[in-house]
Amino acid sequence: MTTLQPRAAAEPRPASPRARGDRRSWTGWGFIGPFVAVFALVFLAPIAYSVHLSLYRTRLIGGTAFVGLDNYRQALRDDQFWAALGRVSLFLCVQVPIMLGIALLVALALDSGRLYGRNFFRVSIFLPYAVPAVVATLMWGFMYGTRFGLVGDLGDAFGVPLPDPLSPHLVLASIGNIVTWEFAGYNMLIFYSALRVVPHSLYEAARIDGAGQFRVITAIKLPAIRGALVIATVFSVIGSFQLFNEPSILQPLARNAITTDYTPNYYTYSLSFSGQQHNYSATVAIVMGLITMVIAYAVQLRGMRKGA
Amino acid sequence: MHKHSRHLLRGIGLVCALALGSTACGGSGDGGSDHRAVSAADIRAALKKGGTITVWAWEPTLEQVAADFEKAHPGVTVELVNAGTGNEQYKALQNAMSARKGVPDVAQIEYYAMGQYALTKQLTDLGPFGAGKLSAGFSPGPWNGVKAGGSVYGLPMDSGPMALFYNKRVFDKYRIKVPTTWDEYVDAARALHRADPKAYITNDAGDAGFTTSLLWQAGSRPYKVDGTKVRIDFSDQGARTYTGTWQKLLDEKLLAPVNSWTDDWYKGLGDGTVATLATGAWMPANFASGVKDAAGDWRVAPLPQWTAGGRASAENGGSALALPELGGNEALAYAFVAYANAGEGVRTRVAGGAFPATTAQLNSEEFQDTGFPYFGGQQANKIFAESAANVADDWSYLPYQVYANSVFNDTVGKAYVSGTRLTDGLKSWQDASVEYGDEQGFTVEK
């Protein structure tokens, strides 16, 4: 894991003469104490408690019993869980490239300096991110309405009934649309700020060498913001796997399309709050957390590898 | 880096959990329910002594009742809390019960959800308070709803004997006869949709409560419950009668794909594109407040029948007030529940637009002769009261109906949005319910 931080390798650790001494100082602990206490309370304790929960099973009839790893075995064989994971994986493979692609295009356009009204453009693209996800989803939910919503009005205007964005085979794409709208601006900002720190002398050198805009992008800009690209991708991977807000808010509008096991997170929520299956819910959450970590880590490793 | 530390901490968390696991145990609470009788004198003493009770309910008419109760008994404070409607409140209640903290003294619980709380002994048995003696005062459907395994776990607050609400203006405009059977209902649906492609006979986008009510009326008894023994079967004659008819409505796309209580729904009720509603007698107040534009357009008719000339009815919705086991102040809480649901409070609530579960009110002339300005002066309570008397009282819900209803749209919902047959949808609902029952330790017969 330490290899993730290239800087760590670059700075040789100073040999500490005190390390082998007996005089241990507790002053350092005093400084990090408050942090550690809060961290343990709000971060470690919940994880520990989830793991604890996942080893038990509470039933309406028969009470609580220790079941060891039974819940994990059940999760590995749970079709609903894997179907949900498949759904967010599909979402990840389609939505994330589109969203990051748009964000990158916009960032490059802004950075090119040829755009008129750049600041206005930047703010307006970023604005959706400032809208709370709940509000954004409700708003889109209204627009998606085929009877009284925007989609319905458009259908009336053109005289053709448009397909229902909340029907089972389109709803994932509709959610993807909302998420793209919300987060393209945020990712654009990450890319754009990474682009701003590229030294202008590089561009001048490239121009002297006769490189066109396209060549500048592929040879200078993209390699320069690679770290930002990887970070944005990792965030998006985590975001996709944790998809919850949008489906849960759209659910009352599309109850037959968005099932209670639609995404892994929504599944754990349903297990816990409709089914009282807190133990199994904790198990699914932990398994999902592990899977997310593995994939996010893989993306990061792959992205940071030199020459990849 | 954030991810870095998280990874590391998972490991630490695991160690902590192992340590925790060895010390923490399953939490075996001693229920603490002693079943001694609570006499009328005890209750009077509690009222005299005074105190505060917390009531979780979303029923709007209770506000006035609580105020009156406080006035009648100085020293008593009723804290009325709206912790959400239906399922939202159950989630909050269940969380409070799991945490054994913040549990209200009185909670509103719908009949379909009573079983779950009664079975797990999360509600106080009201037998020792003398609630059994009140049975004669309530109509059979609701009373059946508060009983479980021979004990009484709540007092019925309201009821929802079903009737057909229809938009008379639309029916007159297209010269369609008001259906008296469900076959006629299908014909009416066709005629209406042909006359106006934007208009539908009703909205149904998959609603567990509505479907179970129609099954109830059709004579189906999918749930047989005997303590922790459960039998689930959606293939009886009654269920076939229901699916046969409803499949036609689905196949011919005669049902507006609109969920109840949404904006679209209210608009549809107002502009005539949703022309009928088969629902509980608690609906009029919602019409008056939510569909003001259509005042005078709507009328009430008896629920269509599965066999011509029949009089079968069913309940849709309705709720009781119960005393959570972990709540306190039992005598005072019971006094309030009895006041609100079997005493003075009933009149107050009826005046506020609630539909009572007490026979005295249902059969009173004053109640039956009430004209509804919204329904063009129609004496709709006559129809509701007759419906209430014709509800078969041998229906039972699952002891975990709240969960079952939550997966209704995962299973039966498929029949509303794809080629899945309603029968197959009900079968997968059955399977999901059986699986959950098994997991939760019930003895489920298939």
Image (cartoon, coloured by chain):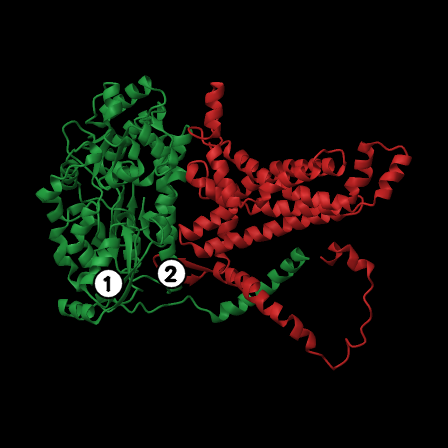
Q: Is residue A103 above or below residue B78?
A: above
Quadrant position of residue B191: top left
Tell me, yes or no, whether dots 2 and 1 are on the same chain: yes
Return the residue found at the far left: B365
Q: Which chain is green?
A: B
Which residue bears the numbered disc 1? B333
The x, y position of residue B241, in whole percent, is 25, 30
Name the secondary structure under disc 1.
helix
Q: Residue at x 71, y 79 (%)?
A: A25
Q: Is residue B69 left or right of residue A139?
A: left
- Is A280 in front, or is B107? B107
The x, y position of residue B177, in whole percent, is 21, 21
- Is B323 in front, or is B382? B382
The x, y position of residue B10, in whole percent, is 60, 60
Which residue bears the numbered disc 2? B96
Please tell me the colour of chain A.
Answer: red
Residue A162 in view here = no
Q: Is residue A103 left or right of residue B383?
A: right
Mark 2 vs mark 1, CA separation in Å: 18 Å
Return the disc, 2 or 1, that comes first in the chain's sequence.
2
**Image quadrant for the N terminus of chain A?**
bottom right
Q: Residue at x 31, y 25 (%)?
A: B248
Q: Is residue B234 above or below residue B152?
A: above
Name the kind of residue labelled 2 in the image: Ala
The x, y position of residue A185, in whole percent, is 64, 41
Residue B315 in view here = yes
Dot label at residue B23: none
Q: Chain of mark 2?
A: B
**Image quadrant for the C terminus of chain A?**
top right
Name the kind of residue labelled 1 in the image: Ala
